[in-house]
Amino acid sequence: MSSRVHLFHRLPSTNTSAFQFALQGASHGDVVRANTQTEGRGRLGREWQSPPDKGLYFSIIVRPRLSRDDYPTLTMTAGVAIASAITRHYGHVAALKWPNDIFLSGRKCGGILCEASFQGDEREKWFAVIGVGLNVLAESEDFPVSLQETATSLFIETGRRVVLDELFSDIYREVLEHVAILEKEGFAPLLEQWKTYDFLAGKILQWVTNSGEIVLGRSEGPDISGRLQVRDNEGFLHQVVSGDVSLVKK
């Protein structure tokens, strides 16, 4: 069955809608896209700002032939695809901040939110929704004052205005192609690509664990399972699976 694009002017969240479509049997590659979101979501329950007609807000349904343990690598796989498309379109190298942020010139311009479902024992019923929020045409005043120093857009950083539909089509194709690579070759070749975009490589960062503990250390990059390796001042290597990671300001 060929994939379908479900296009809406406004939605609370493309991920929420795509998840419902998937539960109803939507196919691999089906996508939900909106011109704006009223309740866009990011990682750790954060809100994602979605200025109308200024960005790309979409969620791709995938039903990859993967083990359950390999599903977490979909976020980083999508990151490689998006960074590749941005770099090709703009000639401006994008960066990836573990595990799901897209950076340009040191500021965040996008994010990825993957959500999976493993109902029952039949893999055919398993799926993931890869949600993408990307600031494309936004200008500084489109962001809340609280975000204007840390958020950016592709237009702000490059001065280029692109056709949103064309950029969407390219990113969409790249994501599905990279998911196919993940299925056929595993995560290893994608991890090597991801490392070329690694925003945190070798930098001192702060990791706030889910229990609130604060760990300071140097990033040694993600491992083959997608876990971030952080070596603290005592030489202990932490494997970060979840929690909040940020650079330590000098």
Image (spheres, rainbow, N blue to C red):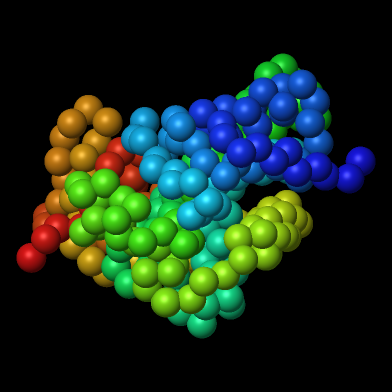
In percent of width and height, residue 209 lies at 24, 36
> For residue 215, what is the image quadrant?
top left
- Along the viewing direction, whichever of 36 and 182 lies nearer the viewer: 36
Horizontal side, residue 100 vs residue 118: left or right:
left
Q: How many numbered marks have been drawn onto this rendered protein structure?
A: 0
Residue located 18% across and 31% down the image: 212
> For residue 169, what is the image quadrant?
bottom right
- Along the viewing direction, whichever of 239 and 12 lies nearer the viewer: 12
Residue located 29% across and 68% down the image: 106
- Eyeballing the image, is 37 above or below 89? above
Does any portion of residue 111 appear in the rendered image? yes
On-image quarter of the C terminus:
bottom left
Taking the view exactly as shown, the residue that stands out farthest to the left is: 250
Taking the view exactly as shown, the residue that stands out farthest to the top is: 120
- Along the viewing direction, whichever of 153 and 53 lies nearer the viewer: 53
Does any portion of residue 235 appear in the rendered image? no
Horizontal side, residue 154 vs residue 150: left or right:
right
Residue located 36% across and 31% down the image: 45
Horizontal side, residue 108 vs residue 2: left or right:
left
On-image quarter of the N terminus:
top right
In percent of width and height, residue 115 lies at 55, 33
In percent of width and height, residue 113 lies at 49, 41
In percent of width and height, residue 190 lies at 59, 63
Taking the view exactly as shown, the residue that stands out farthest to the right is: 1
Residue located 52% across and 66% down the image: 83
